[in-house]
Image: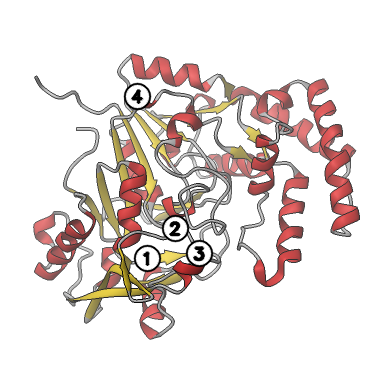
Amino acid sequence: MRKKKPKCVVVVGAQWGDEGKGKVIDLLTEFSDIVVRFQGGNNAGHTLVVGGEKFVFHLIPSGILHETKRCVIGNGVVISLGVLIDEIDALRKRGYFRSDSQLLISEQAHLIMPYHQRLDLARERFQGRNRIGTTGRGIGPAYEDKMGRSGIRVADLLDEGVFRRKLEASLLEKNFTLTRFFKEEPCSKEEILEEYGVFRSRIAPFVANTSVFLNEAISEGRRVLFEGAQGCLLDVDHGTYPFVTSSNTVAANACTGAGIGPTCIDYVLGVSKAYTTRDGEGPFPTELHDETGERIRARGGEYGATTGRPRRCGWFDAVVLRHAVLMNGMSGLVITKLDVLDEMEKIRICTGYRYQGNLLRWVPANMEVLKHCEPVYEECEGWLKDTGGARSFSDLPLRARQYVKRLEKCIQTEVVAISVGSDREETILMKNPFS
């Protein structure tokens, strides 16, 4: 019996985010009909380069550059409406997203309100040296309200009376916390009502029951690409807690965050850099504090797409990747930024951690343990040749091919694509997840 072709593919980050998922989504959009963002908020930034033109997306799925494709912001996303509208306007100014029909927004998605961002920033200031390293975009407080059943959803915004009542109830608590505990100025109800009244008319054309739309599309055989934000190690359950984001970033949340059943998912594609980076606080066993780390940062352009902060850089961590493979049920892996290592004489792979004389093969849950883990390395010879022009695996230098094959063996997962540059064309696709 012939195995059916995958119709639903989930793309997730396999490290601490910033792995190059935007480029992968853009590449695979060509083979899909619909692209869905299923979690996170504008704390994520997906960067891609098309024809030398750079795009950074924070909320709209990266597939929006393909005018014949439909893009969905699912119910699992928390939406900053000001950011979303700015993205829409910027895309249209550059000649993209010319039809409203390209985008659907779930009526069940929760809104990031002005007081969420204010609370986020105030908490980070209050924590001082113990801060989490949040982007300060209000994502955490918005998810807190969602779980506390006091959040405001897109559907609420469209009903002016419901929105006013919910806003008034929220401001009673939020302004009390802002003024009494953090000694901050309160949020103005009238200013929010006026601002969100404008937002209401701008987003109304895009709002829909996206769960019904997606389920009907899948039943009709349409191909759906699910776009995750951040990375597996930032998952609120399975990441390096508490130095994580406020949502589930693993593939399983594609179902919850989009409103489909788990039997719909056919393929899970992970994305990892050929080395490791981390933006923000928290343990990072393979971090390099030397000239090599600076070289990687400079060659890789490792600065946050959302924050602009310099990213922490280190060698490839197979312990982290094995964890990601396990947590996501990964079918295949994309390696990005292989070209960043082109000038390295020696390249290291972390195959395990050493802690108090014991060898660990899995990421420990205790952050004090992880903080004191020493990486166990094996060293590879660098290839010292330009990989940017490679368009097939055989085009790569021998030692680059050997490096990729060694990574596959360390994490027991097939590498199906390799990125050797920032542009859409600078990609080696060995296996199409949709085929």
Q: Which residue is mark 4?
A: 264
Disc 3 to disc 1: CB gap under 8 Å: no
Q: Which residue is mark 2?
A: 16
Numbered circle sitting on residue 276: 1
Bin the neighbour count of mark 2 within 10 Å (Cα to Cα): few under 14, some 14-19, many 20 and up.
many
Q: Is residue 413 above or below residue 220?
A: below
Bin the neighbour count of mark 3 within 10 Å (Cα to Cα): few under 14, some 14-19, many 20 and up.
some
Between 258 and 198, the residue placed more toward the observer is 258
SS at mark 2 in the image = loop
C-alpha gap between disc 1 and disc 2: 8 Å
C-alpha gap between disc 3 and disc 1: 18 Å
Compared across the picture, whether 45 is left or right of 154 comes to left
Query: Of tags 3 and 2, which is closer to the observer?
Result: 3
Give, as a three-letter code, the residue at label 1: Thr
What residue is rendered at 90% in x and 54% in y? 179
SS at mark 3 in the image = helix
Ranked by sequence position, the earlier of labels 4 and 3 is 4
Between 177 and 343, the residue placed more toward the observer is 177
- Residue 292: which quarter of the image? bottom left
Q: Which residue is mark 3?
A: 367
